[in-house]
Image (cartoon, rainbow, N blue to C red):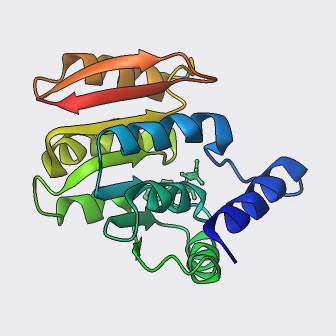
Amino acid sequence: MSIESVMREIEIESSSGKKFLPIVGPVKGNFLYMLAKVSQAKTVLDVGTLTGYSALLMTKAVGTKGKVTTIENDKNYYDEAVRNFKKAKAKNIIPKFGDATELLKKMPENKFDIIFLDIWKEGYVQVLDNCVRVLKKNGLLIADNVMWEEEPLKKWREAIFNHKKIVSFLVPLADGMSVSMKS
Ligand SMILES: C[S@@+](CC[C@H](N)C(=O)[O-])C[C@H]1O[C@@H](n2cnc3c(N)ncnc32)[C@H](O)[C@@H]1O
């Protein structure tokens, strides 16, 4: 199957409401895709794989010469994502099973052009410093759902605007995305 067909299958499954499948979706997905394309990103880190939708989207953007590393800590989602990557013949995705906070600590600095952060929201602030560390200079950290009123998102907005190594802004697209550039 093509990458697009596998993504479409995930979109249909997500919108059917039969199971909880909170994917980034096609609208915010287009924005992510556009940022990856215009910045000519080749190395992407996708934090929060679920069943692989955002990783597949990013693999389309980076092309066959790029690499997408994706992190998931739920074994069922991880296994389903790996099956979806095989189905889509997406060979340049590197799936990693484990907790994002721990895996990020072990990654080398200045490695990624783009990081898409989309884990459970209590984890956002916890991974911020390491996301910035592994991001290349002028690289982009994009986080999803950032306009929610919940405490973890309030703390996220505060943290990104007070962080010394990034310049950030909020994009009021659906429930919001933040875009931060490492300076
Ligand atoms: C909102 S979903 C990700 C959706 C995905 N980015 C997409 O668009 O298809 C969040 C995922 O992050 C995973 N997750 C939550 N906290 C995590 C953590 N600390 N480390 C790794 N994965 C985590 C969850 O199990 C879930 O699959």
Q: Nearer the viewer, residue 72 or 139?
A: 139
Q: Determine which quarter of the picture holds residue 127.
A: top left
Report x, y in % for residue 183.
10, 29
Q: Nearer the viewer, residue 72 or 137?
A: 137
**Number of marks drawn:** 0
Looking at the image, which residue is at 39% across and 44% down?
37
Report x, y in % for residue 123.
41, 44
Quadrant of the image containing the N terminus: bottom right
Report x, y in % for residue 35.
40, 37
Q: Is residue 58 left or right of residue 18?
A: left
Looking at the image, which residue is at 41% across and 44% down?
117
Q: Is residue 79 above or below residue 124?
A: below
Report x, y in % for residue 85.
56, 76
Q: Is residue 3 left or right of residue 39?
A: right
Q: Nearer the viewer, residue 137 or 1?
A: 1
Looking at the image, which residue is at 64% across and 23% down?
174
Q: Is residue 69 above or below residue 133?
A: below
Q: Is residue 135 above or below residue 138?
A: below
Q: Is residue 51 left or right of residue 43?
A: right
Q: Is residue 69 above or below residue 15?
A: below
Looking at the image, which residue is at 25% across and 59% down?
104
